[in-house]
Amino acid sequence: MGERRRLDAPRTVRNWILAAGAAGVAVATGVGIALADGSSGTGYQLSLRVVGLVTYFVVNRFQQGPDRIYRTRMPGEEEEQYERALGPGLIAVIFGAVVQTVVVVLIAG
């Protein structure tokens, strides 16, 4: 048998999650470029939050089945099950924000 993957999500589900995340980053970057006229108003912030929420709900929808199986099979409390993902998740978010900022600055500048 092959290596056991976290959440045991099939390759197609993992690819859809990756595609949805990449699309969310691309749209957020596009919004950042389109609104990079020096204003940091409420419209800009709201539009980025809407893009983030839509991306979250799309990714969450793909992840529900594998996550349900993961929670059922893993021993311990729910908080303990997800503690191991906190560090890598924060690193991914921070790295993604840095990459997005660099791309926006390079394109808009």
Image (tube, rainbow, N blue to C red):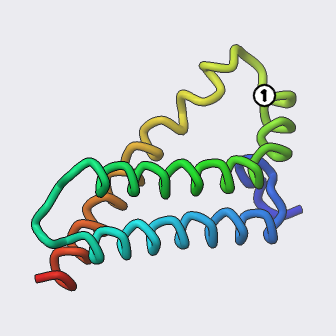
Q: Is residue 85 left or right of residue 96?
A: right
> The C terminus appears in which quarter of the rendering?
bottom left
> The N terminus appears in which quarter of the rendering?
bottom right
Q: Position of residue 28 (x, y in %)?
A: 40, 66
Q: How many marks?
A: 1
| Residue in the picture at 79% in, 69% down | 11
| Residue in the picture at 76% in, 50% down | 61
Residues 105 and 54: in front is 54
Vertical arrangement, residue 33 with respect to residue 39, above or below: below
Q: Is residue 83 left or right of residue 64?
A: left
User: Judging from the image, what secondary structure is the residue with disc 1 in?
Assistant: loop
| Residue in the picture at 59% in, 54% down | 54
Label 1 neighbourhood size at 10 Å, few (<14), some (14-19), many (20+)? few
Residues 80 and 67: in front is 67
| Residue 107, picture quadrant | bottom left
| Residue in the picture at 83% in, 36% down | 68
Q: Amino acid at mark 1?
A: Met
Q: Position of residue 102 (x, y in %)?
A: 21, 72
Residue placed under numbered mark 1 in the picture: 74
Q: Position of residue 34 (x, y in %)?
A: 29, 76
Vertical arrangement, residue 68 with respect to residue 29, above or below: above
Q: Position of residue 90 (x, y in %)?
A: 39, 43
User: In the image as oriented, which residue stretches furthest toward the top?
Assistant: 77
Vertical arrangement, residue 92 with respect to residue 82, above or below: below
